Amino acid sequence: MTNRPERPHQHDSTETLKSALARASTDAQSYAQTGPKQHEDICHTLADEYLDELRIRGEL
């Protein structure tokens, strides 16, 4: 993920981030059971980005 901004989701609304976090978590659980592993890893990476942004905003 080269050339990605440090806070790629800073312009997304809090509601959007929370919804995306829920979806990424659900998808990661699904891929953990069915595969492929790299899709699960991507979902976890996205969830981490959403969590980081929500923490920065003080929403968690």
Image (tube, rainbow, N blue to C red):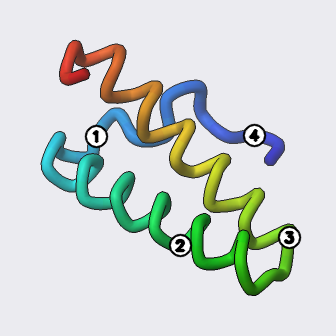
Quick one: 48 or 10, which is closer to the camera?
A: 48
Residue at the (80%, 81%) spot, across then down: 35
* Sequence-earlier tag: 2 or 3: 2
Give the secondary structure at mark 1.
Answer: loop
Mark linked to residue 37 = 3
* Sequence-earlier tag: 4 or 1: 4
- Kindly identify which residue carries mark 4: 3
Q: Position of residue 2 (x, y in %)?
A: 82, 43
Query: Real-space Cα distance between discs 1 and 3?
Result: 29 Å
Foreground disc of the pair 1, 3? 3
Tell me: 41 left or right of 20. right
Q: Amino acid at mark 2?
A: Asp
Q: Amino acid at mark 1?
A: His
- Kindly identify which residue carries mark 1: 11
Query: Real-space Cα distance between discs 2 and 4?
Result: 26 Å
Foreground disc of the pair 2, 1? 2
Quick one: 33 or 43, which is closer to the camera?
A: 33
